[in-house]
Image (spheres, rainbow, N blue to C red):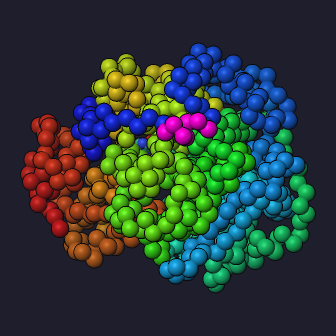
Amino acid sequence: MSQTDKSAPNIESVLHEARVFPPPKAFARGAHLKSLAQYRQLYRESIQAPERFWGRQAKDELVWFRPWKKVLRWNEPFAKWFVGGRLNVCYNCLDRHLGTPTANRAALVWEGEPAAPGKPGEERVLTYQQLHREVCQFANVLKRNGIAKGDRVIIYLPMVPEAAIAMLACARIGAVHSVVFGGFSAQSVADRICDSQAKLVITADGGFRRGSVVQLKKNVDEALGLRDASGDRLAKSVQRVIVLRRAGNDIHIEEDRDVWWHRELEYVGAHCPAAQLESEHPLFILYTSGSTGKPKGVLHTTAGYLLAARMTTRYVFDLRETDVYWCTADVGWVTGHSYVVYGPLANGTTSLMYEGAPNFPEPDRFWRIVEKYGVTVLYTAPTAIRAFMKWGEDWPRKHDLSSLRLLGTVGEPINPEAWIWYHRVIGAKRCPIVDTWWQTETGNIMITPLPGATPTKPGSATLPFFGVLPEVVDDQGNPVPRGTGGKLVIRRPWPSMLRGIWGDPQRYREVYWSEIKHSYFTGDGCRQDPDGYFWIVGRIDDVLNVAGHRIGTAEVESALVSNSKVAEAAVVGRPDELKGQALVAFVTLKTDVHATPELRGELRDHVAKEIGPVAKPDDIRFAEALPKTRSGKIMRRLLKQIAAGTEIKGDTTTLEDFSVLARLSQAEE
Ligand code: WTA
């Protein structure tokens, strides 16, 4: 599907629009919300009297040390929610369950990557009681290593329970965590340390991925040595590194700087009171790609984020006491924050964590886990679903998936074919599907069906969650008629909205609140159908969504031109059957450098080194020149068409040099 063509409804979607799947009766009977009318009533209330609505929710849902005085203080674009209140996210995820039957329930069930086909992975189960103890101990380790309220901590770990423990321990003492996905490079780690001025890094000797060891500690060592253009060490704010023994590989330990996680535990007790933090105390910074420059540090704070995490998890996944809930995201992404750690734990649910890939050692890895643990709710990405479709139905059919009762998807638009396959093959036509739209910036799910109440349509995220007021508008901010494409904006502040970009309020205002007056601009194209259902088309800015990962074209371009052989680079997306979008880089080389297949490999590796393997271009095309307008702007629209192999359409009259186009189209493979 084309991400630029906002106005034309996708033909697939139109064909499927007529197909409506009502909530299965058996499901709706036990659901929190049982009818669309019930949803509409609550939604209406949340929009008409937001402060009353959110005030009531905050009181009912969260445990407070001190009540708030004012629900919302809005000074556009800066929001303060639950002003004057005090609470603690970790307390709300753990302590509140102690002394209740939940205390001895599994909080985290973890399965490590298996060694070989047929072999189970390593396993670990932590009850709420046990997790509480481990978090308190580790919080004491943080304090012992000089971390206090407000300090920033980088977490660069594999998908192991310690990742959640480290996050919760930070939250407990009011330290601000910034989790960096293990697939990012040393350079990316250094950039994040530098921007956040973190004092501490928590990492592991290594993590397992598809049978090999990811050298996390080695990357951290490298990151700590990297220098900027003026020769200054980028990561000089870091005073300590805590290293988890995970893969058992040989690593370097720097005296006076690096300490072992397990050793540190020997020095601390298990008593650590939860800090009484203000509602707006920073909880975490998560770096995410935008249309320009380096990734931005999206800031989330305590009360509003927690409230939305708890509510969305319960309503969207219709949590019940017997659930074994599995969100397959890595904690390095926002989905892992809200729906592996904070949302499920705040509800006292069992959250499953899996370390490995869906097809290692065999493509039935997920289904084996569903069967083994009796997973009831599965939340994954369209990319994974499309891969499962490709691998064939035999893999899921080998397993008993009858425990599943609800399926979810997130991260990119799901094509109706994948939706229907998921529904039929994995859900046996019995499980409702929740297609959830949201972003790192929104903190929590924003547009989604509520499974007992909302009839679903394959490919549509359906209707807004409580308190969320989305609208599809034209460039001037006027709502467009239903059926017409436009920009997706959110008209009102909501509790889990980002509070800003770390250290850069001006950029926050410019990126999100300037495009459309008095509205938060999402960067997504969208259309509402006659029933008011939202159909997200995809990004309309220069952000790509490759296999559910957000990648900024500008970042990849600057990584490419940082190679001494490259003169210019332009990166665009092309539709990809599996990954949604693939990265295509058009590159011009410096004089006397020759385009060779080896150079192509070299440049791909160079990008992996600069940003991380997730950003490797799928395709590098060498060109003699890039098409530009007379004012020197690269004509991305044309490059997208060339990358997609479609005919070149539209106005090319401002093109500086027509012959470039012809040469580009031929400059191939
Ligand atoms: C896209 C991930 C269509 C969208 C939670 C958004 C989706 C970006 C959906 C945010 C969905 C996410 N349907 N598109 N259900 N969910 N997106 O910050 O383009 O990694 O702007 O957050 O993913 O990606 P992010």
Q: Is residue 67 above or below residue 593?
A: above
Q: Position of residue 403 (x, y in %)?
A: 57, 56
Question: In terms of depth relative to the viewer, which is nearer, 116 or 432?
Answer: 432
Residue 120, image quadrant: bottom right
Residue 569, image quadrant: bottom left
Q: Which residues are magenta?
A: 24-30
Q: Is residue 635 above or below residue 117?
A: above
Q: Position of residue 580 (x, y in %)?
A: 34, 52
Q: Is residue 161 left or right of residue 173?
A: left
Q: Is residue 534 above or below residue 550?
A: above
Q: Is residue 550 left or right of residue 628?
A: right
User: Is residue 76 in sight in this rendering?
Assistant: no
**Residue at x 80% of width, y 37% of height:** 63
**Residue at x 58% of width, y 28% of height:** 466
User: Is residue 126 in sight in this rendering?
Assistant: yes
Question: In terms of depth relative to the viewer, which is nearer, 571 or 643?
Answer: 643
Asked if residue 42 is among those painted magenta in the image, a careful observer would answer: no
Q: Which residue occupies the extreme front position in the image? A: 26
Question: In terms of depth relative to the viewer, which is nearer, 209 or 551?
Answer: 209
Quarter of image, ligand 1: top left
Q: Position of residue 593 (x, y in %)?
A: 24, 71
**Residue at x 13% of width, y 56% of height:** 665
Q: Is residue 619 left or right of residue 351?
A: left
Looking at the rendered image, the quarter that the C terminus falls into is bottom left
User: What secondary structure is the magenta-colored segment mainly?
Assistant: helix
Residue 96, image quadrant: top right
Q: Position of residue 587 (x, y in %)?
A: 26, 60
**Residue at x 81% of width, y 61% of height:** 130
